[in-house]
Amino acid sequence: MKKIFDIHTDILYDVYTAYLKNDKNRFKDYHVKQLSNSVIKGGVWTLFSPDEFNLLEALKISLDNIDFNLLKDFNVILGLESLRNLKSLEDFEKIYNLGFRHAMLTWNEENEYATGVAGNPNRGVTKKGFKVLDFMIEKDMIIDVSHLNEKSFYDVLNYTNKNVIASHSNSKNLCNHRRNLSLEQLKRLKDADALVGLTLAGAFIDKDQNNRTIDQFLNHLDEVVSIMSVNNVCFGFDFMDYFGNEVTSNIESVPNATYAHKILEAMAKRGYSDEDIRKIAHDNFYNRFSHLIYNK
């Protein structure tokens, strides 16, 4: 059976924010139902930081409200989408000891560690940011360059090629969104033997909402594969259905995890071999990072 390792989803953040609304069953009632009926069998589950809160407390709340045993034969790597709320390297070590093995330095914001796409284009990774990178390199963590502005992106890649991914972006050449990757960035990631996760975020697929389709998503896949090779591409879907948007922020035909099989079926129709589908959908990421899977 073909299966997918989805290298970007905000499930930890969703469980945390549901808890704040006194919903302690969000994981069981929503995410387990979807993922139990999906070809997605693994994921990098992140805690998103769009604003200020106590990071350590939020992570503990998320983990306390997830029963990982409810998903059979499912592999999770725990991650952070932005370090804006990280107070110190000592706290980062505590987070590592909770089982986290992935982090992005920023979301779109500027913070103490680096600069996101909404920040000053001339500002990059800070001294504190390089210390965080040193910690991640030493601990064999996944360094995710998603959301960084170009200055920070190149600062990271000029500093290390170890365990680098860009978890959820598409080709800027096909859709000029600030979060997509230029051809030059894709080539630099290829030189680093990094992995790029293609996303179903609709605005990253096409500016025209009517063209946010599986076919256009596969056009991004074709282009990124042509640069990165079939061995360096995977999927970071970034499903946003659980944020309660009335209009899907992804694409209408694949609005959530239960419909992910449609991507694999469309790849086969486009001429991708079974081996290539298996690599892109699951094995490229799993074979490289399975040793970082959370020990539930």
Image (cartoon, rainbow, N blue to C red):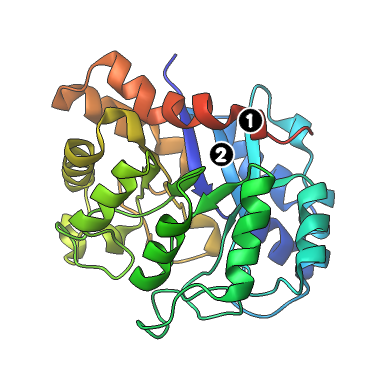
Which of the two discs, 1 and 2, labels the residue nearer the N terminus? 2
State whether residue 156 is above or below residue 40: below
**Identity, as a three-letter code, of the amino acid under mark 1:** Asn
Q: Position of residue 229 (x, y in %)?
A: 24, 32
Q: Position of residue 246 (x, y in %)?
A: 43, 66
**Identity, as a three-letter code, of the amino acid under mark 2:** Gly
Q: Is residue 62 left or right of residue 156?
A: right
Which quarter of the figure has residue 296?
Answer: top right
| Depth check, front residue: 121 or 178 | 121
Q: Secondary structure at mark 2?
A: strand
**Residue under the image location 66 percent in, 35 percent down:** 292
Q: Position of residue 65 (x, y in %)?
A: 81, 50
**Residue under the image location 67 percent in, 33 percent down:** 293
| Depth check, front residue: 110 or 37 | 110
Which residue carries the number 1 mark?
Answer: 75
Q: Position of residue 53 (x, y in %)?
A: 73, 77
Task: Give the label on residue 133, or none.
Answer: none
| Depth check, front residue: 2 or 257 | 2
Q: Is residue 232 left or right of residue 28?
A: left
Q: Secondary structure at mark 1?
A: strand
**Residue under the image location 36 percent in, 50 percent down:** 199
Q: What whole-number distance in Å separates the C-alpha atoms at marks 1 and 2?
A: 7 Å
- Does residue 100 appear in the picture of this structure? yes
State whether residue 262 is above or below residue 135: above
**Residue under the image location 56 percent in, 39 percent down:** 43
Figure quadrant of the N terminus? top left
Badge 1 crowding class, 10 Å Cα cut-off, few under 14, some 14 to 19, many 20 or more, is many
Task: Give the label on residue 43, or none.
Answer: 2
- Does residue 246 appear in the picture of this structure? no
Badge 2 crowding class, 10 Å Cα cut-off, few under 14, some 14 to 19, many 20 or more, is many
Which quarter of the figure has residue 206?
Answer: bottom left
